[in-house]
């Protein structure tokens, strides 16, 4: 049943009326600076925001054993967040519509050197249409949109006529264990929407991601005794070369993969961090790299991991230095498969209609070569998992920013989507 | 005047008698773990050891302005030690001999990962002839030898018949500013001996050393947007390649340099430390390498520095990524010229005789391709600067160790050297 146009207009106007408050709410979220391990304060804030709106509240702690036993569980290291998931549940008086999970993560990646930013990274400055800040786009704007899409209905005396579970998770940037934990705790719905910054498009296909480290150790000596090849930093670069060859062989396998073969370079290996040695005049005895690599949907994380280990081991056997001290590969985060969103679902059709109303354009879909929490719902809940959100620039970079006009559009689309997917009833319990 | 053989025997026996105490003294020095910036406690200990033996004591603080104004001054960064030099001065009753500076440094390089050590690095375990520990060889054994060579004379009722200045310095492993500060403070003598671990050989020629960092900065973005060449860690590796070409061109210049042209690779560039990026899933926006390179005696540090800067800048102009964000080269430590020890000095002849008596072998000399504090005395005091010390293994590496039999031999040689160079008189003031 298509949404009544008059109701659609009232909803759009309501989003408009609440938008100043929504912008202030995003800014408050950005100010938390919630990098990995530092999400307790923001989760408590989210808890208060949901509770004061009348949601039934739950907090869910990470169950390390259950996560570790799951094939999609990210590897748990000492850096893993111990902040809880915060969940607010709306239950209608009459469960007549289709249920929905609205999910977002509060964790953000590190800001990097502050001097590379035009403004301090956790100061949500607005310049023209852009709100700047680490996490402003990825994904505090989306986090706020979940709440304010529902607020827009409440403002006009309505609420969803189905159970809506609003989930605020952690660990999206490192393991995906927040979304997985929500799944393991048993939350289910007929569809899931996660408003990641996707340029107002719907994610059709998504790579899996693995995180791993490689550590090279050698025989440190005074630089006066250095011989070719005994330097762990140099050796680490040779290992990077071998990993780049693996990356190219994986890219060559794009043939026949519908959402990937049109891409120039669908599989990216990123050497995101390096540390080695401790003294300019000592030949470095150790070097450690932290890497992230993508895998195609349908490729198991464990199979990919074995291939990475074998590539490093095979190369090491050919290298005079590394043959003696083989590099150690360890998986330390994401261990996830990718997914494809089946075309033709009701949920997608409802979102497309809502998007068209809110933006005047047809909903386009695309392949995203990065990790997304929607994989949990696509792979393990097996429900339509919609990843769709605002226009942004430079996520994970400096001067990360989100378009506020786009945030308003996608919030409108989300409110329209909720109204049609769940149906509406008069506000109240 | 050659030393009386009977006196020489008495001196050797005296070293033998004091050697158990000397070993315990070295162990006490090793336990201090005196890495850069943490040399205050050991210098206070050295002060007490010298004062209780009756030396006239001075403590000398670093004069940053004077060091910075000197062409051989190492660059002063926040990591620079502010520990004082500790100097003990022996003045004879009758100044009939030749004066001497005995110098040693207390600073040690970082131990690196403890698990690469067979024993904890600051636990001076003895196994057979070897004493293990960071700094045991470089150069706490030599530091102790300065003191115990003089103690050996005192034990048989003698003292040098000339002024002997015993200097305990810092910053030998990073800038050479300790030895330079002693020079700037005005200490002078007819010869200098520094018992670095030189395998019972005399250093004939020594490279200068420069420390520098190169920092590459880029435009960090989410890994989903990564393009070839925008990764600062990859870019840093390309800079290392350009520096390796500079290293090879400097090695090619060995032709015609007497102490160097016979060496396969006299000039070593060491990339001793690397740090870059902060997140596996963010394309790294920065990477910093800390390097050490050697220069031939006679090459000015400032000239070499300009050549390094030019090599990096010239390469950056050819690189699509680096051309936009040129790497920044900074000199952050050693800025020193090398030296050659002229053959035929009286001091060397006296040392050769002493060495022959103590070890039964002829004194050999060699080129050391590493920084040595003797450069201060060779270049700026213009006196015979003798760098000669015990047999060691793995200095700057793990399981650094010094041969105790060798320590005894070189202590004997040093005591014989002092007795002949300075002459002796009856103990007392």
Image (spheres, coloured by chain):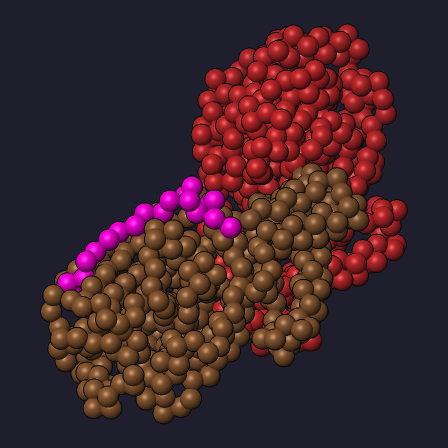
Chain colours: A brown, B red
Where residue A109 sits: x, y (%)? 42, 61
Residue drawn 35% across and 80% down? A350
Residue drawn 47% across and 40% down? B37
Up the image or down, B410 lies above or below B302; here it is: above
Q: In this rendering, does residue A17 appear at all? A: yes
User: In the image, A3: left or right of A287?
Assistant: left
Q: Which residues are magenta?
A: A53-71
Residue drawn 85% across and 22% down? B361
Q: Nearer the viewer, residue B369 or A198?
A: A198
Q: Nearer the viewer, residue B34 or B51?
A: B34
Up the image or down, B322 lies above or below A280; here it is: below
Q: Quadrant of residue B41?
A: top left
Where residue A162 sits: x, y (%)? 24, 68
Magenta span has A12?
no
Where residue A178 sits: x, y (%)? 38, 55
Where residue B412 sits: x, y (%)? 71, 17
Q: What quarter of the picture does the C terminus of chain A occupy?
A: bottom left
Q: Quadrant of residue B248?
A: bottom right
Q: Nearer the viewer, residue A218 or A342?
A: A342
Q: Quadrant of residue A423?
A: bottom left
Magenta span has A68?
yes
User: In the image, B28: left or right of B318?
Assistant: left
Q: What quarter of the picture does the N terminus of chain A occupy?
A: bottom left
Q: Count numbered badges in the picture.
A: 0
Q: In this rendering, does residue B375 appear at all? A: no
Q: Nearer the viewer, residue A404 or B35?
A: A404
Up the image or down, A20 lies above or below A326; here it is: below
Residue drawn 26% across and 51% down? A59
């Amino acid at each position: 049943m298509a949404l009544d146009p008059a109701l659609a207009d009232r909803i759009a106007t309501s989003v408009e009326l609440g938008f100043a408050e929504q912008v202030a709410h995003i800014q408050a979220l950005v100010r938390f600076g919630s990098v990995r391990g530092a999400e307790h304060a923001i989760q408590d804030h989210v808890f208060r925001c949901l509770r004061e709106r009348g949601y039934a509240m739950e907090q869910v702690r990470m169950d390390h054993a259950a996560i570790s036993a799951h094939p999609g569980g990210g590897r748990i290291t000492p850096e893993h967040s111990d902040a809880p998931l915060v969940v607010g549940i709306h239950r209608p008086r009459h469960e007549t519509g289709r249920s929905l999970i609205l999910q977002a993560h509060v964790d953000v990646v590190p800001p990097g050197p502050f001097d590379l930013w035009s403004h301090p990274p956790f100061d949500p400055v607005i310049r023209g249409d852009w709100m700047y800040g680490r996490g402003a786009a990825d994904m505090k704007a989306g986090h706020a949109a979940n709440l304010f899409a529902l607020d827009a209905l409440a403002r006009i005396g309505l609420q969803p006529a189905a159970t809506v579970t609003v989930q605020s998770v952690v660990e999206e940037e490192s393991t995906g264990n927040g979304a997985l934990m929500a799944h393991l705790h048993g939350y289910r719905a007929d569809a899931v929407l996660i408003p990641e910054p996707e340029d107002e498009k719907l994610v059709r296909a998504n790579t899996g991601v693995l995180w791993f480290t490689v550590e090279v150790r050698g025989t440190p000596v005074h630089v006066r005794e250095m011989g070719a090849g005994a330097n762990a930093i140099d050796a680490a670069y040779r290992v990077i070369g071998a990993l780049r060859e693996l990356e190219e062989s994986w890219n060559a396998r794009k043939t026949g993969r519908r959402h990937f073969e049109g891409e120039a370079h669908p599989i990216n290996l990123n050497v995101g961090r390096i540390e080695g040695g401790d003294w300019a005049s000592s030949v470095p005895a150790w070097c450690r790299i932290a890497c992230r690599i993508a895998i195609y949907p349908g490729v198991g994380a464990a199979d990919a991991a074995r291939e990475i280990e074998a590539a490093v081991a095979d190369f090491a056997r050919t290298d005079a230095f590394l043959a003696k001290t083989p590099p150690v590969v360890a998986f330390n985060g994401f261990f996830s498969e990718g997914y494809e969103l089946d075309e033709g679902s009701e949920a997608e059709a409802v979102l497309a209609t809502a998007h068209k109303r809110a933006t005047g354009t047809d909903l386009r879909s695309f392949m995203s070569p990065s990790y997304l929490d929607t994989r949990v719902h696509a792979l393990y809940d097996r429900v339509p998992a919609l990843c769709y959100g605002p226009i942004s620039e430079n996520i994970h970079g400096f001067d990360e920013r989100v378009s506020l006009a786009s945030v308003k559009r996608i919030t409108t689309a989300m409110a329209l989507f909720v109204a049609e997917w769940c149906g509406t009833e008069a506000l109240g319990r």
